Amino acid sequence: NNNNTHGLHCYEFDKHLKGTNETNKKVLRELYTALERGEFEVFYQPYFGINQKLLGVEALIRWNHPHLGLLTPASFLGAAEETGFILELEKWVLTKSINKMRKLYQNGWTDLRLSVNISAQQFENPRFPKMVEELLKEASFHPENLTLEVTERFLIHKENINIVNRFKATGIKLSIDDFGTAYSSLQYLKDLNIDEIKIDRCFISNLEIDNNSQKIVEMIIMLGHQLNLNIVAEGVETEMQLQLLKKMKCDSIQGFLFSKPIPFNHLKKNFFQQMKETWSDNYVFQKN
Ligand code: C2E
Ligand code: MG
Ligand code: MG
Ligand code: MG
């Protein structure tokens, strides 16, 4: 896993931000330059129904840094958030991924979903809802095919209920990412009209050996179903985890067992080769 090596660099990148306003400006300039030079790239990680039917893809940002190599978000999201660059970056990710999805739709994969991660900062940006609506309209993209993933950090504030409802009214789906890792207040499940919960990888990675994790996951799935939520397990890496999740009636799965996040072209090659012969309804992921 190259996360760690990149994490080191990224840590460096994030660290030199902490200084003065001057360094802040410098980092911001660096990030904008990278965007202008086309160094950012969107990777896509597919996710599946429990029976391995392809349901959609999640957009995940990467930075092809000229000196540091391919950076994962852990190494630069902190800097992007502190400088406010995240607002621009996420707009770019949305635009890019929506346009790529359109290509798949034009080839008949019309029920494929797109999930995009959105920071709390962006959700609280008053211009954000309009921006998304305009993007979707320009691309003739059905709002029902879009899922926005937010973390508990955003949901915890009760006054954000209006923002959530505004998105819900357009047909866009909302998902709680990394569920169980942050404040874990159940209050927002009661107050907010969300569609999906993504159980964090930390509960999945030791599912086989940790009885407590099993109990917690089971409880989240049962609770989620009572509330009519779609439950996704993140970070599924082993066949055993898959079987346990199946037994627990988890709805959807995502993880290295099926696919890592990959560039769009690989996605096409790995999953949509049979584009002409097969429709997504019939397509079930085959492990090689
Ligand atoms: P996330 O949204 O929870 O995405 C899942 C992360 O877990 C991804 O890391 C993915 O590569 C990794 N992952 C998926 N399956 C497995 C597995 O089976 N095993 C292991 N070990 N890892 C797995 P990645 O791509 O490094 O992204 C990290 C986080 O960065 C994301 O977590 C998300 O919170 C954030 N992120 C990525 N793109 C964006 C973006 O455009 N905007 C915002 N705000 N955040 C983003
Ligand atoms: Mg996510
Ligand atoms: Mg997550
Ligand atoms: Mg995460």
Image (cartoon, helix red, strand yellow):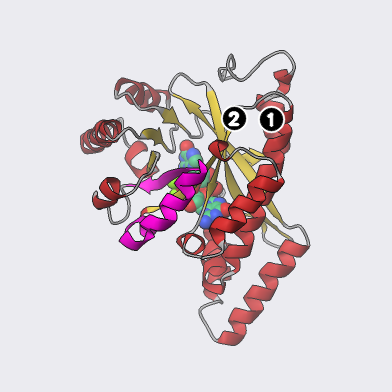
Q: Name the residue under label 1.
A: 105
Q: What stretch is highlighted in magenta?
A: 153-179
- From the top left corner, tell me how far across and down residue 157 is, in percent: 33, 61
Q: Mark 2 points at which residue?
A: 112
Q: In which quarter of the image is the N terminus?
A: top right
SS assignment at label 2: loop
Q: Is residue 266 visible?
A: yes
Q: Is residue 229 left or right of residue 100?
A: left
Number of other residues with Cα within 10 Å of mark 2, as a class: few under 14, some 14 to 19, many 20 or more: some
Q: What residue type is labelled 1?
A: Tyr
Q: In which quarter of the image is the C terminus?
A: top right
Q: In this view, does 144 lie to the left or right of 104?
A: left
- From the top left corner, tell me how far across and down residue 230 is, in percent: 38, 33
Could you tell me which residue is drawn at 61 percent across and 40 percent down? 44
The answer to whether residue 162 is magenta is yes
Could you tell me which residue is drawn at 38 percent across and 43 percent down? 194
User: Residue 234's quadrant in the figure?
Assistant: top left
Instruction: Mark 2 and mark 1 in contact? Answer it, CB < 8 Å.
Output: yes
